[in-house]
Image (spheres, rainbow, N blue to C red):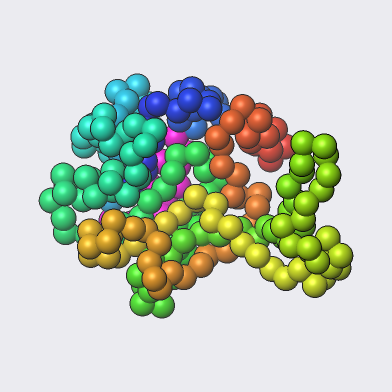
Amino acid sequence: MICARGGSKGLPDKNILDLGGKPLIAWTVAAARGATRLDRAIVSTDSPRIADAARAHGADVPFLRPPELASDTAKITDALIHAVETLGGGYDVIVLLQATSPFRTSADIDATVAALLDTGAESAVTFTEQAKSPDLFVTVDPDRRVRPLNPEGLLKRRQDLGHLYAPNGLCYAVRTDYLLRTGRVYGDDTVAVIIPPERAIDIDSPFDLEMARGLMAVRG
C-alpha cells in the first residue's frame, strides 16, 4: 500500500514534484513493482492528480481515498484499514510504503516482509541508526542558558553513548489480522530492519527535496 495524500502543507504537491525526471511517487511505485514478496501493490490517495501520475508510471489505483481519511488529523492506519475493507480482504500481510522515500529499494521491501514472516513477529519496521544520542540533547532557556535533558549526557564519551535507532518511514509490514484488531502497525512484538541513512531520506520539506535531488545527481 503506497499512501500519498494530496494535502501536504510543508511541501505542496510533494508526491508529484519532479525528482530525477519523474514524479516523486514514481520511485516508490517502481520499488514496489520490483519487490518479489508482494502479491499486489496499490496506491491509496485522495488526489486525482496523484492517481493519474501514479497510473502513468504503472501503479494500480483501484479507488480514491475518502477526504476524511486524508486530512491533517487522519491516521494512516485508518487509510490502511479502509483499503483492506475496500479490496475485500484475502491478504495475510499489509505493507505500508510512504511515497516520500525515493531511495528505498525493492530489496528493502522484501527484507522487511521476510523479517516479519521469518520471526513470527506482529510487525516489521525499518529503522536507521541515529548519529546523535538523545543524551546530547538540551533545551535552551530564553537567556540562552543550556539545560541538558540528561545532566550527565554532555560529559559522556561518544563511544559510551550506545547505538540508538529511529523509524525512518521507509517500510512497515504488519499482519492484517493484527492491523484490523488493533489499528496499529507497531505491534507489541515488532522486529527491526536496519536501513543505512543514504537510503532512508524522507522528503518532507524543500530542503529534503533539494538534498535528494543533489544525491540523485551525484549518483547519476
Q: Nearer the viewer, residue 205 or 110?
A: 205
Question: Does residue 157 sit above or below 33 in this rendering?
Answer: below
Q: Position of residue 172 (x, y in %)?
A: 42, 57
Q: How many marks?
A: 0
- Image quarter for residue 129? bottom right
- Residue lying at the far front of the rendered structure: 143
Can you tell which quarter of the image residue 158 is in?
A: bottom right
Q: Magenta stretch: dominant SS?
A: helix
Q: Position of residue 61 (x, y in %)?
A: 26, 35
Residue 132 makes an appearance in the image: no
Which residue is at the front of the view, 11 or 105?
Answer: 11
Question: Which residue is at a point 37% across and 37% down the rendered structure image?
Answer: 73
Examine the rendering and report whether any part of residue 148 can be seen.
yes
Observer-nearest of 206 and 21: 206
- What's the residue at 82%, 37% (across, down)? 143
Name which residue lies at 86% across and 65% down.
155
Residue 197 picture location, percent across and down = 65, 52
| Quadrant that contains the C terminus | top right
Drawn side of residue 213 relative to residue 193, left or right: right
Which region is colored magenta?
25-39
Magenta span contains residue 38: yes
Could you say where residue 59 lies in the image, as x and y percent from the top left? 33, 37
Q: What residue sits 27% from the left and 61% below the top? A: 182
On whether residue 96 falls in the magenta region, the answer is no
Residue farthest left in this picture: 88
Pick whichever, 32 or 188, lies toward us: 188
Q: Residue most toward the bottom?
A: 119
